[in-house]
Image (cartoon, grey):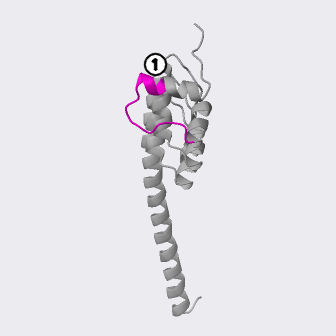
Amino acid sequence: MLPPTAMATSAAIVTALVLFMFIATLCAFVFILRLGRIWVKAAASGVPVPMSHLLGMTLRRIPVQPAIDLCVRLRSAGMTAPIEAVASHHLAGGNVALVAEWLVALKAAGLERSWGDVCALDLAKKLPTRVTISAHDVEQLAAQSDLRPRAQ
């Protein structure tokens, strides 16, 4: 039989472990609940994103909600951008919202380009940063970056 001080010490250790496990479980639950809400929103919008990608983006401190919103917005405009590409452009220091705006504007002007093409222009600082994009801006960008209208 253990002496009373050893029993008190082991009881304190067990209590500390139970408390630690409770706090860790609560944190994991809150974390999964937050990412789960974003994951459900993405899946319901037709943008399938694995939970592991959301977790990786969170650990790399990439804002998950705006990235998913951007992918949903592009999907509703009839275009796609993989979430990995959005995350890597963000990590490269690019302006993902501006790239999305330009993709939509270029598509509306008949100049469909890929996500990578417009990201390259953004990183080269060749995209005007105005929120309102005029036809003149699209023509000017097409001229300076050798974009040609797609043949119908």
Q: Amino acid at mark 1?
A: Ala
User: Taking 82 as reference, is 22 above or below it?
Assistant: below
User: Does 67 appear in magenta?
Assistant: no
Q: Horizontal and vertical percent for residue 6?
A: 55, 89
User: Taking 135 as reference, is 123 above or below it?
Assistant: below
Q: Residue furthest top?
A: 152
Graded by Cα atoms within 10 Å as few (under 14), some (14 to 19) or many (20 or more), the crowding at tag 1 reads few
Q: Is residue 132 left or right of residue 110?
A: left
- Kind of element beneath mark 1: helix
* Residue shown at 52% from the left, 86% from the top: 9
For the record, the magenta segment spans 125-138
Look at the image and tell me whether residue 47 can be seen: yes
Q: Is residue 89 left or right of residue 74?
A: right
- Residue of label 1: 108
Image quadrant of residue 45?
top left
Magenta stretch prevailing secondary structure: loop
Q: Horizontal and vertical percent for residue 98?
A: 47, 37
Look at the image and tell me whether residue 46 can be seen: no
Q: Horizontal and vertical percent for residue 78?
A: 49, 20
Image quadrant of residue 152?
top right
Q: Horizontal and vertical percent for residue 82?
A: 58, 33
* Residue shown at 46% from the left, 35% from the top: 70
User: Does 130 appear in magenta?
Assistant: yes
* Residue shown at 48% from the left, 45% from the top: 64
User: Taking 109 as reference, is 126 above or below it?
Assistant: below
Q: Residue furthest left?
A: 132
> Foreground residue, 27 or 97?
97
User: Taking 85 as reference, is 149 above or below it?
Assistant: above
* Residue shown at 58% from the left, 89% from the top: 2
Image label count: 1
